[in-house]
Image (tube, rainbow, N blue to C red):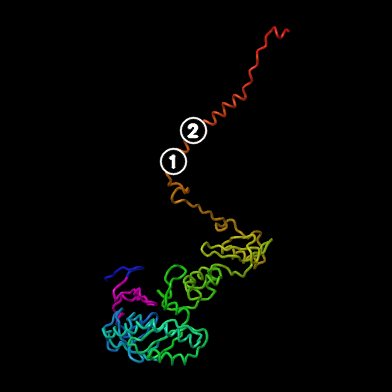
Amino acid sequence: MDFTLYRGGCQMNKKGCNRNSAQKLSTFDWMCDLPETQKETDFVEVQFKNTRKGYFLNSTKIQLEKGDVVAVEASPGHDIGEVTLVGRLVLMQMRKNNVNPEKIEIRRVYRKAKETDLEKFQEAKAKEQTTMIKSRQIAENLQLNMKIGDVEYQGDGNKAIFYYIADERVDFRQLIKVFAETFRVRIEMKQIGARQEAGRIGGIGPCGRELCCSGWMTNFSSVSTNAARYQDISLNPQKLAGQCAKLKCCMNFELDTYMDALKDFPSKEIQLETLYNTYYHFKTDVFKGQITYSTALNNCVNPAIISPARAKEVIAMNKNGIKPEVLEDLTEETAKPIVVDYENGVGQDSLTRFDPRKKERKKNGNSSKHNNQRSAKQSENGIKENRPKFQKPIKKNDSQN
């Protein structure tokens, strides 16, 4: 299969499995290499602007592939979208999103988009930005407690969808009348949440990468503060909140792994009793497989680091009425302090290791020569000072006198 490279990985052709880098919330087609699955159903998944998707019936048996731009049935008129999934995976996505063809009327795919359809679509799309600015001004003039986040025109330009965010229920009956008189189209108001708005608008997260909700995520799952507690993350609202002011979705990515690892750890509420102290849980290190206990309830006082096996052993001893003398088991490797011997990859720690050496040698030579001369003078002066003064020899005659 032919492929080309783009940032982030391999991009297949229209029949390939990857998503288009410009699409948001697209699904990875892991059945693309199975040709027999591509013709199992006539349902196709069509994606419109940003995150809006729909499932349509290919009743006329048009040969559709992933990436084709099609005209689909809408109310009223028709809409323009891109085919993002075909085959058996569409049925799985419909089951996942609770779309039952027996209970819900599935609209049809009319045809592949023609040039005239694409021209009308581009004309309608060009009016979205100005329409959004005017709609925000109208909502502000009517003093409505709401925020219009995005506007999407239908492919034929006969209807406009206004996506808004509001904390409370909003009576926008007057707003719809003003919108219909101003824009001369059919109006549809759709309320979205803060996460859906972030997925539609996009942005850069605190990690420096594109927001997951606007890049590769296919659905939004609820996030609670328990995810932070399981992973021992600081319960700081400013650090736990994302660009949408809600809890970060990435806290759920490794939650299952942490929960599986914590099955081997005893409960944090259990206290460990020894002959001399009562130990309370202070910290759990999942990566090292260690638990830190403290003699104080909320402070790290007399910390003791033990393994989960040792903690369970002490708990079993306490249940039998036995209290060990020491909480630690010195025979365990986890009880010993971990000493990491770091090596310098460069081999030198001096910041001046790349400075020229000649000047330093010259300076050192002059200074050493000067010091030698100075020490020689000092030694000569010392010898002179210590030398006894000259005394006049005494004559015998003088001594006799």
Residues under labels 1 and 2: Cα distance?
15 Å
Q: Nearer the viewer, residue 23 or 358?
A: 358
The reply, left or right, for residue 219 in relation to residue 397 is: left
Q: Is residue 131 above or below residue 316?
A: below
Task: Tell me the magenta residue range.
Answer: 11-38
Does label 1 or label 2 sit earlier along the sequence?
A: 1
Q: Is residue 295 above or below residue 41?
A: above
The reply, left or right, for residue 233 in relation to residue 105 is: right
Element under disc 1: helix
Counting other residues with Cα less than 10 Å from the Cα at mark 1, is it few (<14), some (14-19), or many (20 or more)?
few
Q: In which quadrant is the C terminus drawn?
A: top right
Q: Nearer the viewer, residue 265 or 105?
A: 105
Magenta part mainly helix, strand or loop? Answer: loop
Q: Nearer the viewer, residue 120 or 178?
A: 178
Residue 280 x/y as whole percent: 63, 66
Note whether residue 95 is visible: no
Q: In which quadrant is the N terminus drawn?
A: bottom left
Amino acid tagged 2: Lys
Element under disc 2: helix
Q: Is residue 101 magenta?
A: no
Per the image, the residue denoted by label 1 is 359
Q: Quadrant of residue 329?
A: bottom right
Q: Quadrant of residue 185?
A: bottom left
Amino acid tagged 1: Lys
**Circles 1 and 2: CB atoms closer than 8 Å:** no
The mark found on residue 369 in the picture is 2
Residue 65 x/y as whole percent: 29, 80
The reply, left or right, for residue 352 in relation to residue 397 is: left
Residue displayed at 29% across by 74% down = 13
